[in-house]
Amino acid sequence: LATGPVASPPATVDGFVREFLDQLNFGQGVKLSQSTINDQYMALARTVRSYLMASWLETGHRRRKEETKVVGYLSAEYLLGRQLGNNLLASDLQDIADQAMERCGIDMAAVRGQEVEPGLGNGGLGRLAACFVDSLATMDVACIGYGIRYEYGIFRQTFVDHRQVEEPDSWLRLGSPWEFPHPERAVQVGFAGHTETYADEQGRERTRWAPAWQVRGVPYHYMVPGFRNGVVNTLRLWSAEANQAFDLQTFNRGDYAQASRAEIFAENISKVLYPDDSTPQGKELRLQQQYFFVACSLRDFIENTLPRDFDLHRLPERIIFQLNDTHPVIAVPELMRILVDEKGFDWDEAWGITRRCFAYTCHTLLPEALEVWPVELLGRLLPRHLEIIYRINEEFLLEVREAFPGDEGRIRRMSIIAEQPQRAVRMAYLATVAGAKVNGVAELHSQLLRDDVLPDFNAMWPDKFTNVTNGITPRRFLRLANRKLSSLITDTIGDGWVTDLDRLRELEPYANDPEFRRRFREVKAANKARLGDLLQVRDGVELRQDHLLDVMVKRLHEYKRQTLKLLHVVSVYEGVLSGRTPVEQVTPRTVLFGAKAAPGYHMAKEIIYLINAVAAKVNTDPVMDGRLQVLFPANYNVTLAEKVIPAADLSEQISLAGKEASGTGNMKFALNGALTIGTLDGANVEILDLVGEDHFFLFGMTEPEVEQLLQRGYVPSAYYDQDPVLKATIDLIGSGHFTGGDPGAVSAVLDNLLNHDPFMALAGFHAYLGAQDRVERAYADPEGWSRSTILNVARCGFFSSDRSMRDYLDRIWAPGQA
Ligand code: 26M
């Protein structure tokens, strides 16, 4: 009994209804007639879970027998999005669930709307991690995703008087039906204290770390189902808990607040996601988070996942830890500490193992985004790790000296320890030294990484560097988010594309088929109507269905150039206002922004204010005759993305060349039948290559041209002085027209543009307007536009994260084996 596979409930409407009612009655403890929407959501989620459970257990069992190499994806962020729809899709229960809910008289849409998405990430990097684990499950690759179970995810954005106000994201308030706590698998993590040397039984000198305090890491498991393949991998997110709720002596004295201080302190570690995504603040709590989750993860893998008596000399045969940016890099000295201090390995032996267990992905080019930890802080929080980092650096610099004798400048440049402006550990260098491979996230980015960010390391180890262009999961971002387009594609070429996205190529001939083009336009119109309904309910705004929908959704950053988009909007408005453009000549257009600003990023918040101020004016000024609308729904997140992207006509990817590492929104739009207006940056370059110049609105400088302009000396005000349209546009903003007559309210943004403009928005303005003219001419020809959108979909199969995972396997995780 009970040794065979666990039985799933019958995959029929009857079976589903029965399981659902059981979950409602015995799990949730209510009768259907008394149940709230939340009861129904919880029971439905638990029902779906039940269907996936047999596969989860089976996959776990198989993995333990297999003895294959596991990918340990180490990421401080997973921006998962809602789980219910995804897991219904993966288990092929969508239709059954719909019918079952109907039979119970339940409003399925309302129940779906009840789910709060786990927003455990900031943006691209966190969403990429979620796409990657989805693809690995679908490809049946053994992967454990390791991360942090933040109690509060990315803040909820609201606008008050046009300004961003952040609210805590208490996504766990009603409980999450998707998580499985495993307190029995908890591990201990130490902090601070001191190190000491001692002689072991053989008289060898050894070091041990005596931490000053410890916390308990409790893992919460989440299912990561593959697409209809019976595979369910695991995401293991760690929550910090105090070892004891109270200091009993203090408790007995009656000082209850003091008695629970240790508990509060420990639990702070996984309390909240840091909402910065480009300028790390070097905060102690952030370092605690990083060490906490990698220490838990390494301990978990070595002690609880590998077989009992596993010989750690062979560790690289069983694990590759992929470092998602530098956030988990403290895992490198942690593994050294485990091997040397705890397991008694020689330093050289341990280092030989460690260097084969890690690979590093870099996600940025901005120098200010590279993490650096002051030695003072690191030494106080993790004294043993600092010693280990020093020794790694010493021996590394010996290697450099040997390879480049007498080149002291190079040694200073390459040192893992920076001396200026304060002594600090350069985490990207540590990752590069330790990593078996280092990759960028798009061709251009990987090239710039070699040439500009890590050139000395590239000179030393050219073979270490490689590229893996990012991708997105076609399950969530096409099949789930755009059911109508998916059906049209499947009706035309079959459903193999869902797991083999290159097959979208088979759509190419249909770009010339007027009937197919008509159906394609029908899909877009339906998606636009669906978004209109949502925005009406959510924000009480009307989305004009006859407008070109022009979308810019991404984090608010100067380098992404939301201001350039805004300058375009204002120039259109100013043209009509000043009588330069007859209003009938304006292409009816809705510009939709979605963007969160890091709470401490002042300029980004000013830009948000300006967008809202411009929207309020432009939307209501009768002079525009309703032909230009600016919408800025608050709190852009994965859930909203799934509705916005399928409805878009135009995708704004207008970062200054050389600044956006890859972008992944760009891929989502192209695959959902929007055309891109964009620069030669990140993965845009590869999208352009694949779809062709006739089907992409390219503008702006190349990265070398940006460099040249910088060398010559960039004077933004010269563009203002010489371009009358730009001047009129900026002057209108500067006049206080959008800010109730108060020019002061926009001066920070305008001063910055006119006097600094680090991302060359003014230099880009003219070419951008030219590209927008080309957009409007193309949009005026619906057949030509449809043809281009179909070719975009047909030619972008490359951007499946399944292909990204194949590339990681071939180039990084199992070269020669795959
Ligand atoms: C660091 C320290 C402290 C607090 C937060 C951070 C931090 C968190 C997220 C820093 C950066 C973070 O994310 C950066 C990011 O999302 N980068 C994007 O990665 C995508 C996936 O590779 C790329 O497509 C984008 O171009 C890149 O901007």
Image (cartoon, rainbow, N blue to C red):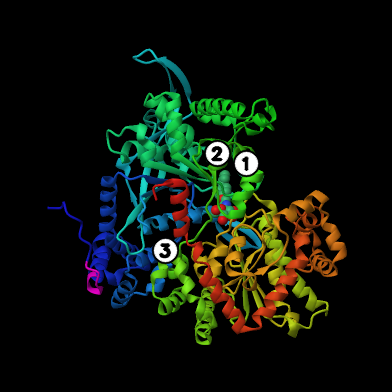
Query: Residue 263's spot in the image, x, y percent?
Result: 42, 37
- Residue shown at 81%/63% (left/top)? 734
Residue at 62% x, 54% y: name it. 444
Which residue type carries mark 2? Thr
Magenta stretch in the rendered image: 10-15
Q: Is residue 780 above or below residue 42?
A: below
- Is 560 on the left-hand or right-hand side of 153? right
Find numbered disc 2 in the image and state the secondary structure of the residue it sits on: helix
- The residue that mark 3 highlights is 115
Residue furthest to the left in view is 1
Mark 3, ligand 1, within 8 Å: the answer is: no
Identify which residue is drawn at 66% across, 53% down.
Answer: 659
In the rendered structure, are the residues bearing label 1 and label 2 in contact, judged by CB atoms less than 8 Å apart?
Answer: yes
Is residue 538 visible in the rendered structure shown here? no
- Residue linked to disc 2: 432
Task: Choose between 490 and 621: the one closer to the eye.
Answer: 490
The structure residue drawn at horizontal position 50% and vertical position 87%, both measured from the top left corner, is: 515
Residue labelled with disc 1: 454
Amino acid of disc 3: Glu
Q: Secondary structure at mark 1?
A: loop
Rendered location of residue 95, percent (x, y)? 33, 74
Q: Amino acid type of disc 1?
A: Leu
Q: Is mark 2 within 8 Å of ligand 1?
A: no
N-term mark: 1 or 2: 2
Q: Nearer the viewer, mark 1 or mark 3?
A: 1
Mark 1: few/some/many CA within 10 Å (<14, 14-19, 20+): some
Marks 1 and 2 sit apart, C-alpha to C-alpha, by 9 Å
Q: Residues within 10 Å of mark 3 (few under 14, many from 20)?
A: many
Q: Is residue 350 rendered to the left or right of residue 641?
A: left
